[in-house]
Structures are given as C-alpha cells and as structure tokens.
Amino acid sequence: MKQAIVARADLGMGEGKLAAQVAHASLSAYEDAGRTARNAWKGEGQKKVVLKATGESELFELADVAEREGLPHAIVRDAGHTQLDPGTVTALAVGPAEDDHVDRVTGDLSLY
C-alpha cells in the first residue's frame, strides 16, 4: 500500500508551502479512501512518495486516470493567503491503494 503525492514544480513554492500542500493532498485523499484501504495503509507504515508535475493540466490528467481506475484521490487548491493566488491548483494525491495500482497512474513521474 502507498500513496503518491504529485506537486507542481512550475510554481516555485517555498519548502514550507510545498510541505503544506503535500500534507493537504495526503489527508484529503486518505479521507476519500475506504475504511479497508485506510486501515491497511496505516498498518503498513503509511508509505508515501512525492513526485513532480510540470503544471496544472498534468495534475488533472492524472486525476482523471485515478478516477477511471477507481482510486482515492484529491486535488488541492491553495487558499491564497501567502505565496499563491487563491484557487491555484498545487498538488494531487493518489491512494492509499496497492502499490501497483498507484503506479499505473503515477509510475512514470520523477521524484520531487
């Protein structure tokens, strides 16, 4: 079981902003998962990987694939209180789900 969080590399987010957006995505996708997947993922150590996206359109394309695959996922839009404009799409989380299922969506992406 794992979760992949895909963050936009084109926004130039500071380290703290990036960490916050990744955390928002992770929790939101976790809440989208069923109880069985949540419990299995928690029991296996909550494995996560953070990956790079080139822009907003890539996040939406990946979210569409996750939706078609029936995987829990979540898109994050920033509130605009600090570095970014309100509504800026910053990250996508896919999973928790079986590793190979998550890899079908995000397996070709580079580590952040």
Image (cartoon, grey):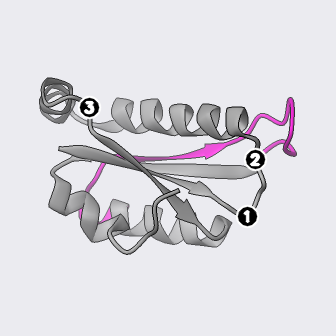
Name the residue that disc number 2 marks.
13
Asked if residue 51 shows in the view, the reply is yes
Mark 1 element type:
loop
Give me the residue at 66% from left, 50% from top.
90
Taking the magenta stretch, the answer to whether it contains residue 84 is: yes
Q: In this image, 89 relative to 109: left or right?
A: right
**Residue 56 horizontal/vertical position (percent):** 66, 65
**Residue 45 horizontal/vertical position (percent):** 20, 28
Q: Is residue 32 placed above or below 35 in the rendered structure?
A: below
Principal secondary structure, stretch drawn in magenta: loop
User: What range of the chain is rendered magenta?
Assistant: 67-87
Nearer the observer, 61 or 109: 109
Name the residue that disc number 1 marks.
10
Question: Which quarter shows the N terminus?
Answer: top left
Q: In this image, 6 relative to 98: left or right?
A: right
Give me the residue at 87% from left, 45% from top.
85
The type of residue carrying mark 1 is: Asp
Q: In this image, 12 relative to 26: left or right?
A: right
**Residue 38 horizontal/vertical position (percent):** 21, 29
Q: Is residue 3 placed above or below 110 in the rendered structure?
A: above
Q: CA distance from mark 3 to mark 1?
A: 27 Å
The disc, 3 or 2, on the residue closer to the chain's N-terminal end is 2
Mark 3 element type:
loop
Q: CA distance from mark 3 to mark 2?
A: 25 Å
